[in-house]
Image (cartoon, grey):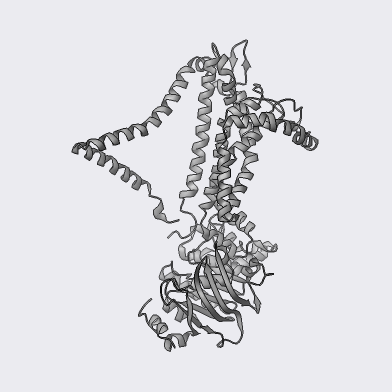
Amino acid sequence: MGEAAWPSLPDCFFIRRGVILNLFKRLRRGNLGDNIFGFVVLLFGVSILVIMAGIVFQLWLQSAPSREKFGWSFLWSTAYDVQRQNYGAGVFIYGTLVTAFIALILAAPVGVGIAAYLVEIAPRRLNRVVGSMVELLAAVPSIVYGLWGFYALNPFLRDYIAPPLQAVLGWLPPFSGEFVGTSVFTASVVLAIMILPTVAAVSRDVLRAVPDAQREAMLALGATRWEMFSRAVLPYAKSGVLGAAILGLGRAAGETMAVTFIIGNNPQIFKSLFGQGATIASEIAAKWQEASGLTLPVLMELGLVLFAITIIINISARLLVMLLVRGPRGGLRA
Amino acid sequence: MSYLHEISEPVVEVQDLNMYYGAFKALDSVGMKIAKNRITALIGPSGCGKSTFIRGLNRMHETVPGARIEGKVLLDGEDVYAENVDPVRVRRKVGMVFQKPNPFPTMSIYDNVIAGIKLGRRHKKSELDEIVERTLNQAALWGEVKNKLKDSGMSLSGGQQQRLCIARTLAVEPEVILMDEPASALDPISTQKIEDAIQDLKKSYTVVIVTHNMQQASRVSDYTGFFFIEEMGAPGQLWEFGETERIFSNPKRKETEDYVTGRFG
């Protein structure tokens, strides 16, 4: 990777300042077409920020009754009492994080494995085929995953996967209990499939960013391809792969329709994965139509919480990926 | 052209070697013998196939997609391209130091040195300590790093990193060490240190070094091979080979003379 490929921060700043200066020059010259073009494009650019700010503002405004009533304890309270109008986000945050984490645990090894295959082993032609298949996975609409999860995957997991799991690990709380209808387990598996393209695609980019000099160094020492990957490539790329995983986590946390179909929308702190639960997104999707009185502001505040969670997850993931792809590591420093 | 007659007991014997990148022929029927416990320098203008040639000796050439090879490379009389030969085994016997230092950035200096031997059988801690000290000494780096073996390999200067890479290669105890312009990215003082290290290496190793630096070739090597391309796009050839002294004082071919006297290159 040439160093010139990445402009340093002052450079970026300088270029951007240059663009703006040019814009002003043109304004003064009075070139109408360019003025209009510049203005319209600027509007489009700014509109993203306006929309983001608008969403947060609306959620904040409309959740006011809920925020005033429950205060900060809304975040950790696990209350869910319709009669007494007492609500907390705890149950839903729990459901969101647990399903997202399980999805990640299932998807991360497979996703990194796909990336490793694409970068290290696949011949060029196959590379493109498998690569676009993975990207197609991401193009399947969420609702289709929901239907498939409900009618195909759930019965399969219930009849063929859950019994052997319970036979071996049934003494552990997460694998105890009965698999009745839909379940947290099925929801997590569907989520895992849904985030697989994200994890695989980002991991692939990250593994590609590892300099070939690192691979050659390990190969020349008499390493097999596996040793090369596990001892030189993966350690070099680990922060980026972690970033890929966290991006997947972010996607899983925000996923709505498929989960709403499958998880059962039962607001409880589930102990068994075969039981039912609810995530923030599934709760909002399931309840908004019948919301009245305090429930609407509660849903709005839940939305605000979800927004914050996914933003935090995404920013930290992107920072990790950026650190790797831009960082001047390996090779010559002088 | 082949120069197989000059060396009687070669470690490596290359016979009629053709190397390709896809449809492009990079090297044309090279024959060469590489003498045991001697330093062989390969010189020639850029793009004439010197680096490609040494990558053919330890089967690194085939890691490039589309790369292909014809001919024989005998290591101790055994063809490294024979069907039953594992390239991994070849690379353990024929080590390589690259043009740009490439230590493993996530490993300490100590772990960098033992990265290669950790791939093989298990070693005792005391054994490893001994190997690290010995190879870092051979690479003329021990004195500079003995008090910070646990620091990252990236904390070293470019020249020190390259010597670390030499130590890492030595630790595997190969028979032959290939060096692809090991000092071209370094300052003169670092270059000097690396040249000194290479001189010492020939007591126990056979070294093949690619260099653009004519003084370096004449200073360190016993034998010199001059690679040349007749025109752009043509494959590289081994134009002349012989004892370094003769190549530099009394070359047989005009192009060799022009090159070593600096008339082109």
Q: Is residue A247 left or right of residue B219?
A: right
The answer to whether residue B90 is visible is yes
Q: How many marks?
A: 0
Q: Nearer the viewer, residue B4 or A250?
A: B4
The image shows residue B29, relative to residue A83, as above or below, that is below
Viewer-nearest residue: B264 or B148: B264
Instruction: State the image coordinates of residue B94 (x, y, percent, origin top left).
Output: 60, 71
> Which quadrant: the C terminus of chain B?
bottom left
Picture coordinates of residue B228, whole percent (x, y): 44, 77
Q: Residue furthest left?
A: A29
Query: Looking at the image, is A42 positioned above or below residue A67?
Result: below
Q: Nearer the viewer, residue A73 or A118?
A: A118
Image location of residue A291, percent across then percent down = 56, 14
Q: Quadrant of the rendered structure where residue B255 is?
A: bottom left
| Residue A245 visible here | no
Q: Image point 48% across, 60% down: which residue?
A: B156
Q: State the image quarter where residue A161 is shown.
A: top right
Can you name the residue that lies furthest to the right here?
Answer: A167
Please tell me which residue is depicted at 52% across the width and 79% down the height of the picture. B40
Residue at 58 percent of width and 44 percent of height? A133
Image coordinates of residue B206 in percent, x first then y, are 57, 77
